Amino acid sequence: MLSLARAGAADFARAEFVRLGLANSDDPEALSLGARLLKDVALAAAGQRRRAFARASARAYVATAVNGGGRYGLVNAATMSLLAGDAARTAELAAAALDAAGAAPQAGEAGYFDRASRAEALFLLGRREEAAEMLAAAVAGAPASLSAHASTLRQLSMIAAEIGAPTAWLEILRPPATAHFTGHMFAARAFEDEAALKARMADLVRAQRIGFGYGGLAAGADILWAETLLAAGAELHVVAPLGLASYLETSVRPFGEHWVGRFEACLARAASVRFAARDPYAGDDEVFAYASRFAIGCAILRAEGLSARAVQVAVWDGRESTGPAGAGADVAYWRETGRPQAILPFERPAPDAPAVVASTEPGERGVKAMLFIDVRGFGALHDAQVPAFFEVVMAGMAEAIAGLAAPPEHVETWGDGVFLVFDRPSDAAEAALVLLEAHRRLNLRARGLPRHLALRIGGHYGPVHLRVNPITGAQAVVGAHVVVAARIEPDVAPGAAYVSEAMAGMLATRHADQYRFGYVGRTTPRKSFPPVSIFNLSRR
């Protein structure tokens, strides 16, 4: 349930908390979880609902403190009292948090959270200079606990917004920036030229304070960026557009054998490797464009999760790309998001390797957003309930789909399963949330259906084959990325929508003001199907 709460599915987590009887438990962990769930609902609400849930959360955190929660419970109770509009209670609980007995702060994260809780209490009492000193001590004691820093940054920023206080002193908590790196492919150049370029790259990485880099590993600028990031102590995250063997033969070896060893060395030191596709190159350059946008989305998601800056760093000659992929296309795509860019001017030498020419026929491939939907509990229905299920649940979905501003371009159904295909991730995201909202409004009991019937929606965005089914004569959407979408749905909590990292990243890049993406975890491993990172999708 804590994972659901962190992912943004607070309402479902609270329902499960109550259903399992934990709301009546005196167990310290259960009390803390209950208080956290009430807090999440309060933070997502407004007006009287926000204040009511904040008061309930404050009471729950006090109970947590009484049952062993100590300073952590008291300071959270103080903050929730602030949100409830009770200034006197806020001061009383914050002072109690500072006075709470406890062992001397430990090293590592335990010591960090103790000091961060003291800093929060001092801030609530208006003692900002002391709070800043305590916060600096917390960070100094656990400099690598970036997720913890980000959590504290969000908490203290929320308090600052509530009381109208400045936030510059909180920048000590800001994790290093995440970057998408890109640039031109090129073959061997004079050592002096490469050395000078890498020196400029190193200066830029330091100036931008980059701690995480996401991008490809093609010969030329990509590999130079990867080497520079690793030398600076940053994490390298590779997004490969193809299976590694094909990627090596398509984008590395043709530019010079010396790049191969450097490719392999960077790959060996990468913190992660993601694949836009695992197949050999088939002449479709759209997969390279998709891989770049996947990498961009990953960088932005990481920044969102850490409350960090996202920046693009590029080695670019200033010319627009002539096709869907390339440094120019990456720069233009990022620029549309309004986020910062840092570009190193580059005079590209004459082509050192033959250009790759796309050979896929138009209309046979496309990058699409897909939703797989099923209904939890359908298999347990009695045969006499099936007609009502179609008249209520399936008809409700049909009505919701028909009312979409951007309806799906492809629909398939079987039993309680529905497969929808959209051209844009934002259209798929909106459809998923509209379907969930419409289902919650249904009066199931009035038609003799169990109330626990709930939609589970899995979403993904990726390249697919657009064919004609030779049996039915209808359009078919098929391919490995359809399987990715299908494999997400069984891991979805009832009443929720989970999307792949690729789809979450695409949405975060252009629609972060509309949707939230809470990291849930990875899909259950299945035979011949590697786990995929998934995110809960909800509205802001």
Image: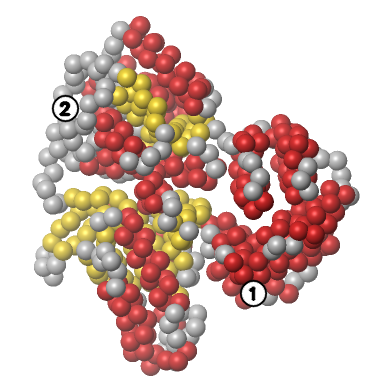
| Residue located at (25% from left, 50% from top) | 367
Tag 2: amino acid:
Ala
Residue at 50% of width from left, 80% of height from top?
452
Residue nearest the viewer, comparing 158 with 28: 158
Residue 193, located in which quarter of the rendered image? top left
x, y percent for residue 338: 38, 40
- Disc 1 crowd rating (10 Å Cα; few below 14, some 14-19, many 20+) is few
Tell me, yes or no, if residue 177 can be seen here.
Answer: yes
Left or right placement of residue 182 versus residue 125 in this view? left
| Quarter assignment of residue 402 | bottom left
The residue furthest front is: 164
Label whose residue precedes the other's in the sequence (1 or 2)? 1
How far across and down, in percent of the image, does residue 439 sit? 41, 77
Camera sees residue 219: no
Question: Measured along the vertical axis of the image, is residue 52 above or below residue 70?
Answer: below
Residue indicated by mark 1: 18
Residue type, mark 1 in image: Val
Q: State the residue position of label 2.
A: 355
Work out whether 460 lies above or below 213: below
- Report the residue at 64% width, 74% height from top: 18
Residue 112: x percent and y percent? 73, 40
How far apart, in angstroms, are the residues tagged by discs 1 and 2? 61 Å
